[in-house]
Amino acid sequence: MNPAPLGVFDSGIGGLTVARAVFERLPHESVIYFGDTARVPYGPKSPDTVRRYSGEILAYLLGRGVKALVVACNTISAQALDFLRERSPVPLVGVIEPGARAAVQGTRSGKIGVIGTAGTIASGAYERAIKRLRPDAAVCVQACPLFVPLVEEGWFDHAATELIAREYLAPLQRAAVDVLVLGCTHYPLMKPLLGQVLGPAVTLVDSAEETAKAVAEDLTRQGLGAAPGNRPTHRFVVSDDEPHFRKVGARFLGEKLQHVEVVPLG
């Protein structure tokens, strides 16, 4: 048993969907969440920059005494996971491998769709992770850059969002995918709309839920879980713009954020 907190981090706000999934699956665990809101978005930045920024967050959270780390960002998972694992003395889980695993387990036809930011899609990380597990899979990918601003605006089920979703998802429908990986931590908030557009024949893989599952398995396997009677505390830290994080973060968590610290990095 280990009462130390888990560290969950992202380039901004989207990783709160992963934090929420962790709260729900591991209700006795304390969490420190770090969002690098001063330097978001990471998607258009070079891999070297993503590694440098995420390395700074890693050092900060290790300094806060975390017992394990969750990289709640597809861009960081795609471009810096190995770099971070080499430098982390504690277990570290990204969002891509759990999503790829669930997609391979869930497909009947072997036709798998992936949507994400331009950076995540361009990295090819999901295709590599899926093909490692199922070499004969047909993977169809689609960058959906407009989804993040729409989600942060709260337009999860707006008519304009549906129009854009139909446009983005058309190539995946033509490819007859039977599983779609939501390869960005903002996208779980769009699940009802995406399900409506694609219909019941397509299984949606929520990388936030799958990552929380992987974290729970890791903690159990390594004997790092908190005691069942532990009373958890959740702390939220950002590098800038605390009012925006508090306002938009409430949509992601489904509850108000009581206390947010500001800690600039770099």
Image (cartoon, grey):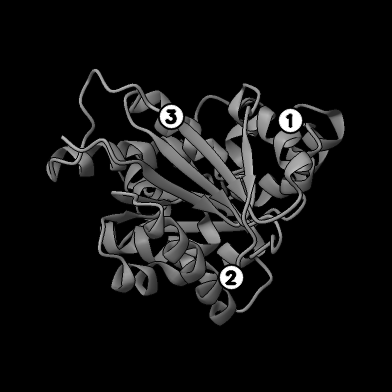
- Figure check: 32 above or below 53: above
Q: Which mark is residue 233?
A: 3
Residue placed under numbered mark 1 in the picture: 156
Q: What x and y, as percent, mark residue 166?
A: 74, 40
Mark 1 burial class by Cα count in 10 Å: few <14, some 14-19, many 20+? many
Q: Amino acid at mark 3?
A: Thr
Seen from the viewer's position, the closer of residues 167 and 156 is 156
- Give the CA separation, mark 1 to mark 2: 25 Å
Q: Is residue 246 visible?
A: yes
Residue placed under numbered mark 2 in the picture: 122
Q: Are marks 3 and 1 in contact (CB under 8 Å)?
A: no
Nearest to viewer (mark 1 / mark 2): 1
Q: Earlier in the sequence, mark 1 or mark 2?
A: 2
Q: What x and y, as percent, mark residue 110?
A: 37, 49
Q: Residue at x 50, y 29 (%)?
A: 201
- Figure check: 126 above or below 228: below
Q: Residue at x 34, y 63 (%)?
A: 131
Q: Earlier in the sequence, mark 3 or mark 2?
A: 2
- Give the CA separation, mark 3 to mark 2: 37 Å
Residue 116 falls left or right of residue 245: left
Mark 2 burial class by Cα count in 10 Å: few <14, some 14-19, many 20+? some
Residue 172 falls left or right of residue 149: left
Nearest to viewer (mark 3 / mark 2): 3
Mark 3 burial class by Cα count in 10 Å: few <14, some 14-19, many 20+? few
> In the structure shown, which secondary structural element does the residue marked by tag 1 occupy?
loop
Q: What x and y, as percent, mark residue 59?
A: 43, 66
Q: Is residue 206 visible?
A: no
Residue farthest toward the right in the current orientation of the protein: 160
